[in-house]
Image (cartoon, rainbow, N blue to C red):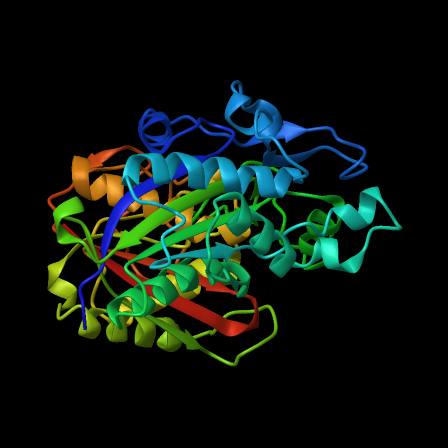
Amino acid sequence: MRPVFTIADNIISPLAFGTASNYAAICRGESGVRQHTKPGIAPFPFYAALFDELADTSHIDTIAGNFTKFERLLIASAKDALGNAGIDPADPRTLFIISSTKGNVSLLEDDKTVSPSAIGLASSAAKIAAHFQSPNQPLVISNACISGLTALLTGMRLISSGKYDHAVVSGADIISSFILSGFQSFQAISAAPCRPFDVARNGINLGEAAATIVLSSDPAQSKLRLAGGAVTNDANHISGPSRTGEELALAIRQALHRAALTTADIGFISAHGTATLYNDEMESKAFGLLGMNAIPINSLKGYYGHTLGAAGLVESAIAITTLQQQEMPGTKGYAVSGVSQPLQLSDKTVPVHAKHCLKTASGFGGCNAALVFSR
């Protein structure tokens, strides 16, 4: 099985265009989460990270063609990452993988006569692949909030097996009334900026973003590896996570085994950290079961909100940059621990000495994912 490397990435968020600019912004403690008054999305003010705040939209606005906002975000992100990767997207050995939870579902709110085929994620993926003249049928990964990590794991397995040499893994989601009201029905939305792992946490903020990570079998292009990964399901509840953390712990254990590492090798953890009561508690228990309490950990939801199908890619790109820079952004909104297991959290950017890092995610339906990145 061939090793797989991360050779380029991009993040587009309300904070900035490009991974380096996003990383610098969150290390300064900046957040894209704001209070918004948008009657088209909600009849009351709400906190979220929306693209209205993005100063420079030229990368998105200048994309020609009959594309939706969701599709333009994916194209802009993939274009930037491909430019840095130096690979040909039209190469038959290059695959496009699209990660999203909602895609163009907002079209149903804007146009009641819209064709169902225009809303389907497969339709968007085909348009994006055609834009880059890819000869391969693209893959779509829509697996709740672990979509981004599952997409990366899928790309890694296809390259490792020799089927492809490169995978362009892109994810995006935009916020609509349907999405916000859905999370409100679970009483999961915070009325203030979210506070991951904090004693005062009471729910999530949603966010918009797009991100791309390009994977390759070529070791000459990068010294950063996607070393291992795994997915599990706790079969606990349609929306509530496991009460024990055992199933996320299993995913972490399997990811480490496939990376030929132990918990002692991990230099920091990029957690899912949604700031809901149950998710953060479950994650803390999973880390406690594995004896990972002393490893530096963060959540990025206070900067980006929960970006759904883009979250795993956004947060993985920041984790990769953290491995390169050896400084871990803090957990914005965190002050006093509110989980049962002690964790090494800080609201400040802190130095780390890491050769390997762990990225975790969990989502509706009981799904869990863990990836290991190595420098």
The quadrant in which residue 123 appears is bottom right
Residue 244: x and y in percent read 41, 75
Could you tell whether 201 is left or right of 223 in the image? Answer: right
Could you tell whether 62 is left or right of 2 in the image? Answer: right
At 85% from the left and 45% from the top, the residue drawn is: 111
At 20% from the left and 73% from the top, the residue drawn is: 258
At 18% from the left and 63% from the top, the residue drawn is: 3
The quadrant in which residue 192 appears is top right
Q: In what quadrant of the picture does the N terminus appear?
A: bottom left
| Residue 227, placed above or below residue 105 | below
Could you say which is closer to the camera, residue 321 or residue 154?
154
Residue 70: x and y in percent read 61, 42
Residue 52: x and y in percent read 62, 26
Q: Is residue 303 visible?
A: no
The quadrant in which residue 116 appears is bottom right
Q: Is residue 192 visible?
A: yes
Residue 363: x and y in percent read 51, 64
Could you say which is closer to the camera, residue 130 or residue 277?
130
Could you tell whether 375 is left or right of 44 in the image? Answer: left
Could you say which is closer to the camera, residue 182 or residue 188?
182
| Residue 296, placed above or below residue 209 | below
Give the residue furthest to the right.
Answer: 113
**What number of labels is visible?**
0
Give the residue furthest to the bottom.
Answer: 235
| Residue 31, placed above or below residue 77 | above
